[in-house]
Image: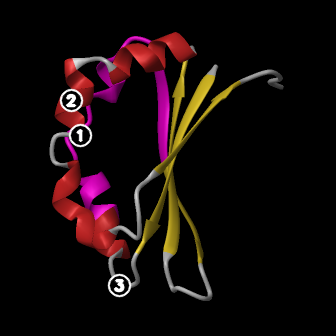
Amino acid sequence: MYLAMNRFMIKPGHEDDFEAVWRERDSKLSELPGFESFRLLKGPVDQETGQTLYASHTIWESEAAFTAWTKSEHFRQAHKNAGNNRSMYAGHPQFEGFVAVLME
């Protein structure tokens, strides 16, 4: 199992817009080999900056399945408009990938 996570810091007042982008996207993830699940998680508001933390999590059968997706036309299409919403982001998304070593 492989978990791919992106962390996003969203500027104050843009939370609804950010969530709408995710809700309204044309996701094709369920069609991809090795894809298992997706979650968009809303975290705490930073008390100093007012920015809200979000994390997107995708679970894949394997790291190889995730890597294959990142090299696919599906990936290019899913990210083609990523720069259109820069005004809501407080910096670039931060990627983290995890390989499962223990599952219960």
Magenta residue check for 77: no
Residues in magenta, as a range: 19-39
Neighbor class of circle 2 (other Cα within 10 Å; few <14, some 14-19, many 20+) is few
Neighbor class of circle 1 (other Cα within 10 Å; few <14, some 14-19, many 20+) is few
Query: In the image, what residue type sits under mark 1?
Result: His
Q: How is the image coloured?
A: secondary structure
Total of numbered circles in the picture?
3
**Element type where label 1 sits in the image:** loop
**Measured Cα–Cα span from mark 3 to mark 2:** 29 Å
**Element type where label 2 sits in the image:** helix
Q: Quadrant of residue 72?
A: top left
Pointer 2: what residue?
Answer: 76
Can you give x and y, in whole percent of width and height, for residue 27 in the image?
Answer: 26, 36
User: Are the residues tagged 3 and 2 within 8 Å (C-beta)?
Assistant: no
Q: Nearer the viewer, mark 3 or mark 2?
A: 2
As displayed, is residue 91 above or below residue 22?
A: below
Q: Residue at x 21, y 29 (%)?
A: 76
Query: In the image, what residue type sits under mark 3?
Result: Gly
- The quarter of the picture where the N terminus appears is top right
Lateral position of residue 30 relative to residue 98, left or right: left
Disc 1 or 3, which lies upstream in sequence? 3
Pointer 3: what residue?
Answer: 13
**Measured Cα–Cα span from mark 1 to mark 3:** 23 Å
Q: Residue at x 29, y 54 (%)?
A: 23
**Measured Cα–Cα span from mark 2 to mark 1:** 5 Å
**Element type where label 3 sits in the image:** loop
Pointer 1: what residue?
Answer: 79
